Image (cartoon, helix red, strand yellow):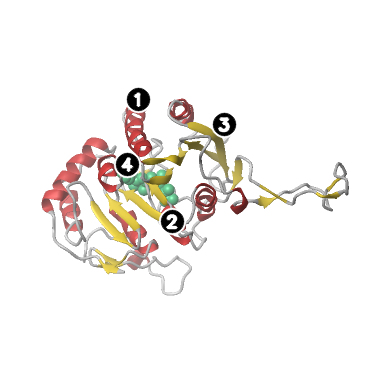
Amino acid sequence: MLDVDARTSERFASKFLKQSAKFGYGEIPNRSQREVTKAAFSRIMSTQTDSTIFENSGHKLVWGDALQVLDGAVADASVDLVFADPPYNIGKSFNGRRDKWPSDEAYLEWSYQWIEVCLRKLKPNGSFYFMCSTQCLPFFDLYLRKKLTVLSRIVWFYDSSGVQAKRYFGSLYEPILFCVCDPEDYTFNADDIKVEARTGAQRKLIDYRKPVPSVYSSTKVPGNVWEIPRVRYRMPEYEEHPTQKPVALLERIIKASSNPGDLVLDPFAGTFTTGYVAKELGRRFVGIEIEDEYVKVGLRRLNIATHFKGELLVKPLKSYDSGYSEKETTPMLLDK
Ligand SMILES: C[S@@+](CC[C@H](N)C(=O)[O-])C[C@H]1O[C@@H](n2cnc3c(N)ncnc32)[C@H](O)[C@@H]1O
């Protein structure tokens, strides 16, 4: 493991700021924010023109703007599986960067650009999992259909304990498109993801059509509605991020659509759940994230670095842990 500590790259910092303002969707940083960002670049391992890359044991974490850095970070036709969980254009705040484009058209235009780059990175037998808001699904479904074969339209269903809609039917799912480059040649490890085949009966169902009646198979490949709880504060896997995806969701996807040693790409890594699971399952991983707070999470979860910006990377205590203090666990942008 590395203690990330290297030279300052002011040139990189200002170029990065200009680019993220151009291609991102947040505000252009004010003067003091620029100083903070420059300080953030003072202890980094290595810089390329557009990105900072951290690597360890076949896993690569790229700090930068996906659209800008994807090409340099990953070779064409080298990726077995892409899992893409981009900003949904619904106004969430990712560490202060607002997930909102001026118009649907602007959002779609940006999305189609990075999707095209991802598709170029896929091997001819590769798979592409794409998450989006329910509102935008029709656009992406139509778009991806022209480029790939959409094999499943998955509904990730979860119950919500939060505020419930009172004047319409509240949203309890997120769509995931499962697409492949070649429907005749793609990885699908059915046996690795089987779930219990529930019948609702007390005893096992008997198949009387067989010459010797026998019990029906008790496991099956999951259907396209996946009931997996969202990540909650009290779950051990919880990280401070508004849209963290559950380990169980990524386990199913990575087990089904890749093999040990394969390369998995996540262009919007967030808390690096994809990388964490890929590593646990013996796959190689490349993840890109623009926000330094989440890069810290990724460096820790993937065991790539012990320190970042002089800060020891430890998981923040929860409010119910002994030794918790609100002051100590407040996320810091600047070194003290
Ligand atoms: C929906 S979240 C991904 C959550 C992730 N799947 C997880 O399990 O934590 C989208 C992430 O993309 C990041 N992001 C937004 N714009 C980006 C860009 N242009 N390049 C790279 N990352 C970006 C955000 O900071 C956010 O963490």
Label 1 close to label 3 by CB (< 8 Å): no
Q: Which of 321 and 69 is in front in this view?
A: 69
Q: Report whether 183 appears left or right of 274.
A: right
- Which numbered disc, 1 or 4, marks the residue that appears first in the sequence? 4
Gap between marks 4 and 3, in whole Å? 48 Å
Residue that badge 2 annotates? 261
Q: Residue 105 carries which label?
A: 1
- Looking at the rendered image, the disc whose residue lies closer to the viewer, 2 or 1, is 2
Residue at (38% x, 54% y) in the render: 285
Q: Is residue 277 above or below residue 25?
A: below
Confirm or reject: label 2 Cβ below 8 Å from ligand 1: no
Q: Residues within 10 Å of mark 2 (few under 14, many from 20)?
A: some
Query: Quick one: label 3, few (<14), some, or many (20+) residues within 10 Å?
Result: few
The alpha-carbon separation of the residues under discs 2 and 1 comes to 38 Å
Badge 3 is on which residue? 167
Of pointers 2 and 1, the one earlier in the residue sequence: 1
- The residue closer to the viewer here, 326 or 33, is 33
The verdict on label 1 being within 8 Å of ligand 1 is no
